[in-house]
Image: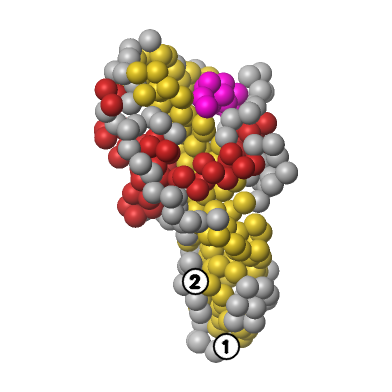
Amino acid sequence: MTTLGTASAAPGEVETGRLAVGQTRDGTEIGLPCAVVNGASDGKTLYVQAASDGDELNGVGVLNRLVPQLDPGAISGTILLVGIVNFHAFQVAEHRNPIDDTKMNRAYPGDENGTSSERIAAVTFDAATRADLILDLHQGSTSRMIDEVRVRCGRRHRLHDECLQLAKTFGCGYVLDQKGPEGQLARAGPDEGIPTIDPELGGCVGWDEDSIQTGVEGVFNVLADYGFVDDEAPADRQTRAKSFDQYGSPTGGLVSFEVELGDRVSAGEPLFEITDVFGELKSRVTANNDGIFWRTRRLPQVATGEYVCSVGTNVDTY
């Protein structure tokens, strides 16, 4: 019998339940939706979570599509899932936990006696560190972004190669291999000896079916390559960026992009123009370096200095 919160599954079973993380302001118990997929035979343990940022819903969509397709009778090992991590932010469709104004994916490994976010992080980290592999499903918030996977432990970390291999197996096509901020699960997991990646499944308001399908396929790739299911994962080469160039607007106005997400760009190539309300050109911005057009803001209006787009740089394939 394998248990996560109130979900307990015998070998060959799937059960759902709730993972207790505290109480709301009226004293109601908070339980994160969780599930246990207990394979019919022994094997590794995979932990998957979604919505640690409350407005990043594509990961929730992945679990919504994934779990009904899992046959525990054909699985070796165990899959532990937490469907919504940032409970308070999810309820109000916000990015940060409104109880303590914290970005949840900066709170790991958490503190069982700390703030709301730290306590949730501690409980979910305890679940995650029961596993041999960790997938922390994200998206580029509500901006526009390519589907990619982030390796956040840093290239000098002892588990870097294992995390990079996990990212390649997931197989979005693009990998950002850059050390992340402290408090990210994708940094805290490797520190505990567990390969961890941060799939960033596009970026949208609500969810995007194409990115969700990419995520579902990515999880199945991991299940196949790491022996959970009797299948073969494709070994496609991935395009890796090791850094970002971020661009702000030199003036206020309306943005018009000159390239599409995923396009290769060369140094000096136009990226975007800023016009006034009546279409008169105010500024044109070009790429500083060769790279891949990775991410953009969603809304066209910008103030001086406001974020516009990012280009992945220092690019190779592996």
Indicate yes or no whether the magenta region holds residue 124. yes
| Rendering quarter of residue 160 | top right
Looking at this view, is 107 or 126 the one in front?
A: 126
**Identity of the residue drawn at 66% across and 23% down:** 111
What x and y, as percent, mark residue 195?
A: 57, 35
Residue type at numbered disc 2: Asp
- Residue occupied by mark 1: 281
Farthest-out residue, right? 156
Q: Is residue 281 left or right of residue 250?
A: left
Q: Residues under labels 1 and 2: Cα distance?
A: 24 Å
**Identity of the residue drawn at 41% across and 26% down:** 79
What x and y, as percent, mark residue 88?
A: 50, 33
Could you say which disc has been placed on residue 263 in the image? 2
Could you say which disc has been placed on residue 27 in the image? none
Name which of mark 1 and mark 2 comes first in the sequence.
Answer: 2
Residue type at numbered disc 1: Leu
Q: Is residue 153 above or below residue 38?
A: below
The magenta segment is: 120-132
**Identity of the residue drawn at 33% across and 38% down:** 231
Q: Is residue 40 left or right of residue 27?
A: left
- Majority secondary structure of magenta residues: helix
